[in-house]
Amino acid sequence: MSTVTIDAPEARTVYPSIQVPTKQFYQAALKMVLWSSGTILFCLAMVDFYAQTNASETGIALQSAQAEKLEINKDLRISDIGRYVVGSPIVQTRPADKYTHMCKEMKKYTWKGFFRNYSISVYMGLGNDPSVDFVHGPGDLIKGAGKQTSPL
């Protein structure tokens, strides 16, 4: 006679066991973590890059506009600078910290990046619509606008 062994239904597994090799699992998990962190770091760096670019473009535009106005013997007024501001900076009005012999007030425009903050300072005179006397920021291309240099 032959003997046939019959297992009880509760002793059998319903689903076949799926075994994932642990080495492949850890490699896939490490790749996913590295790609995710790299993507997040790239996005944060782009936020910082745009803040820096906006601050630089605004500083260069204000200095260029001031130089153009000086060529035709006019002043750049504080009411005119709104169209040169790129992005949406935080604006603070303060007493002038430097150049106090020239200016009484200063407007500081600050763009917030993730890693750093970028700012430009606009120094102005007195009055209802004061003239912009000096622009200091991360795009100082026009050095000594209005200063005369000697040929020596």
Image (cartoon, rainbow, N blue to C red):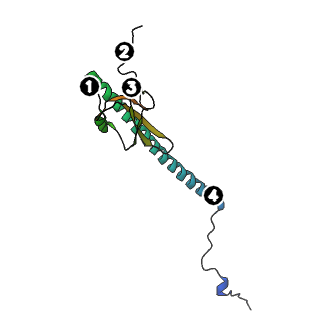
- Residue 105 numbered mark, or none: none
- Residue 26 numbered mark, or none: 4
User: Between disc 3 and disc 2, whose residue precedes?
Assistant: 3
Q: Secondary structure at mark 4?
A: helix
Q: Position of residue 124 (x, y in %)?
A: 35, 31
Q: Position of residue 17 (x, y in %)?
A: 63, 73
Using a 10 Å C-alpha cutoff, classify the residue at mark 2 as few (fewer than 14 neighbours), some (14 to 19) or many (20 or more): few
User: Between disc 4 and disc 1, whose residue precedes?
Assistant: 4
| Mark 4: amino acid | Tyr
Q: Secondary structure at mark 3?
A: loop
Q: Position of residue 26 (x, y in %)?
A: 63, 58
Q: CA distance from mark 2 to mark 4?
A: 68 Å
Check the image and name the residue furthest to the bottom. 1
Q: Which residue is mark 1?
A: 74
Using a 10 Å C-alpha cutoff, classify the residue at mark 3 as few (fewer than 14 neighbours), some (14 to 19) or many (20 or more): few
User: Between disc 4 and disc 3, whose residue precedes?
Assistant: 4
Q: Which residue is mark 2?
A: 148
Query: Nearer the observer, disc 4 or disc 1?
Result: 1
Q: Is residue 9 above or below residue 135?
A: below
Image point (34%, 32%), residue name:
62
User: Between disc 2 and disc 4, whose residue precedes?
Assistant: 4
Q: Which residue is mark 3?
A: 102
Q: CA distance from mark 1 to mark 3?
A: 17 Å
